[in-house]
Amino acid sequence: MKVPEHVSIIMDGNGRWATERGLDRTAGHMEGVESVRACTEAAVECGVKYLSLYAFSEENWGRPQSEVDALMGLMFKSMVEELSNFLDNGIRFIVLGNRQRLAEALNSEIDACMEKTKDNGTLTLVIFLSYSGKWDILQAAKKFALEVARNPGREEELMAMGPEGFDRYLVTAGIPDPDLIVRTSGEMRLSNYLLWQGAYSELVFSDLMWPDFRKEAFRSVLETYSKRDRRYGKVK
Ligand code: IPE
Ligand code: IPE
Ligand code: MG
């Protein structure tokens, strides 16, 4: 089976999963953490090298403060609890997004977790937190503009840059583009996710709510991916 190097998931449907059961939306987010654990394990078992997860978008700051707080609290707690698992299983942990908007305590815990796991090589687990694709492209363009302004002698060389050159200004610099983007809960949109990096990703949509998306579902989307024919605009 052709295994994708980088699988990315838009984890959606926690709220509906909870509401359908008469539970508080937070209960759905908590159950969703179990799916993160299961999919991380499955990714290691299947030989996937990068698993990235859309955990919180820039737009999600617009949710009720109580839900935002619950999600941030859950992020903090899960990270602390999972550290030993990351160390035991060779998982490198990375958080990408607009980190300036995160609380100081959360940021320092993220830094500590990233530092402790930085030399692990079995799987890189990327959590996109306070992330959006347009934000990423814009911050990259600003970095590029600053570099041009600060290097008057290198203008011509810098302006000759192609798409690969631009990759290094994005927060995902050094991480291969996702081969596969999965979205759960039956929604068929990108919701401002990896707009640049997902240019040639295969898309798979699952009707399962994220808390129900476990190992079997993960293996099944890999199976679907292995049957896809990627042509990159060429003729085969
Ligand atoms: C995904 O589940 C988690 C986040 C976006 C943070 P939702 O909270 O969006 O769940 P639904 O879509 O309302 O069911
Ligand atoms: C997308 O889900 C963002 C994450 C999964 C983190 P949303 O539930 O926020 O997206 P919309 O509102 O359905 O587009
Ligand atoms: Mg949603």
Image (cartoon, helix red, strand yellow):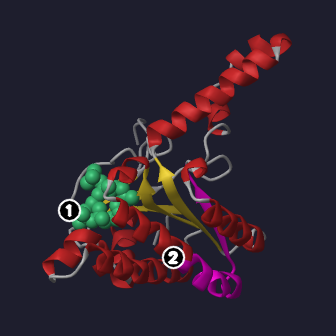
Determine whether the residue tagged by mark 2 lies in a helix, strand or loop.
helix
- The foreground one among 147 and 202 is 147
Q: Residue at x 67, y 87 (%)?
A: 84
x then y, percent, for residue 14: 29, 71
Q: Are marks 1 and 2 in contact (CB under 8 Å)?
A: no
What's drawn in magenta, residue-wise? Answer: 77-97
Q: Residue at x 49, y 72 (%)?
A: 73
**Amino acid type shown at disc 2:** Ala
Q: Residue at x 71, y 23 (%)?
A: 146
- The foreground one among 148 and 165 is 148
Within 10 Å of disc 1 (Cα), the crowding (few <14, some 14-19, many 20+) is few
Disc 1: which residue: 186
Picture layout, residue 172 above or below residue 95: above
Disc 2: which residue: 43
Say which quadrant the N terminus sits in: bottom left
Say which quadrant the C terminus sits in: top left
Picture layout, residue 171 above or below residue 139: below
- The foreground one among 50 and 209 is 209
Quarter of the figure with residue 27: bottom left
